Image: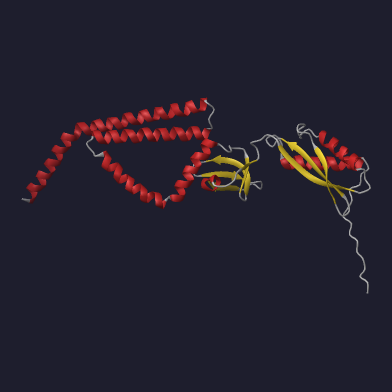
Amino acid sequence: MTANLLLDSLRELWEGFITRLPSLVTGLLVILFTYLTARGVRYLTGRSLKRVKASEHAAQLTARLSFVGVMALGVLVALGVMGINAAALVASLGLISVGIGFALKDVIENFIAGIILIFQRPFVVGDVVHFGDTEGTVEDVRVRDTVLRTYDGRQVFVPNANIFTAAVINNNRNRKRRLDFEVNIAYSADTSAAMAAATQALSGIDILLSQPSPLVLTKDLGDSSVVLKVYFWVDPCEVSLLEARSAAINAVKQALEEAGIEIPSPVVIIRPVDQ
C-alpha cells in the first residue's frame, strides 16, 4: 500500500511537471532573452555615457545598475509565466531585506554615499583632497570607499559615508593655489627696497604663476625685526607645492642678501636682577 502511494505521488509530480513544462521552458527562454537584452543595455549605457564625457566610475556604475534593473524585471516576468506568484515572492523578499538592512546599515550607507560621490564628482582620481585628519592623492573612488595615497606613501581606505558627511577640501579643483611664508628684516633696513627685491625675485621663478602676481606686504613689527608676508600663486596640477615653496624662499633669501638687507636673528636681552 505504501508503495502504491509513493508511485501515485511520483506519477502526480511527473504529470504536473509535464503540464508545466511549456510554461517552464517559456520562462527560461524569457530569462535568457532578458540576460541578452540586459547585456546590450549595459553596453549601450556605458558607451553613451562615455560619449558625453561622464566619469569612468559613473559610466560603469550606471551600466551595472541598468543591467541589474533589466534582469530583475525579466526574472519577475519569467516567474509569472512559470505560474509562480511573483507578488508574494517580492513581499517575502521585502521582509527579508528589512532585516538585512538593519544588519548591514553601515555598508548600505557607504554604498549610497559612494553612488552620490561618483555622480556629483567633488573630486576625481588624481586630485589632492583633505577631509578630517586625512589628506592625500585620490587613487580610486569605489562604491564602498575611497582610496587615498598620503604624502608619505601610505594607502588610506576612507568609508564614503564619512566623506559624504564631512567638509571636503579639493586642492586641485581650482588651478590656482596661493602659498605664503614670512621673512624678517632688520629695523634699519629699507622696507620698501626689501619688498621690491622680494617681489622681483618671485617674478623670476618659472614655476610660479604670473597672474595673480606675487605680493609682499608688511605684516607686523616684531620684537627685533620687521615681519614681511610673502604671497605667491602656483598651479597645483603642474608643480609640487613643496618644491614651489622651497624655490620661493630660496629666491627671496638670495635677493635680500644681494640687496644688502639683513635678515636678523632673534635678539634676547638678559638683564641682571638687582640684589
Which residue is nearer to you in this view: 165 or 30?
Answer: 165
- Color style of the picture: secondary structure
Q: Is residue 204 visible?
A: no
What residue do we see at 55% from left, 43% from top? 146
Q: Quadrant of the C terminus?
A: bottom right
Whole-percent x, y for residue 237 in the image: 67, 35
Image-based side of 5 in relation to 167, left or right: left
Q: Is residue 80 visible?
A: yes
Which residue is nearer to you in this view: 24 or 192?
Answer: 192
Report which quarter residue 40 is drawn in.
top left
Whole-percent x, y for residue 25 in the image: 23, 32
What residue do we see at 91% from left, 47% from top? 262
What residue do we see at 49% from left, 46% from top? 110
Image-based side of 23 in relation to 189, left or right: left
Note whether 224 is above or below 65 in the view shown: below
Q: How many numbered marks have been drawn onto this rendered protein structure? A: 0
For this orientation, the residue located farthest to the bottom is 275
Whole-percent x, y for residue 129 in the image: 62, 42
Note whether 267 is above or below 31 in the view shown: below
Report which quarter residue 175 is drawn in.
top right
Whole-percent x, y for residue 228 in the image: 83, 45
What residue do we see at 44% from left, 46% from top? 108
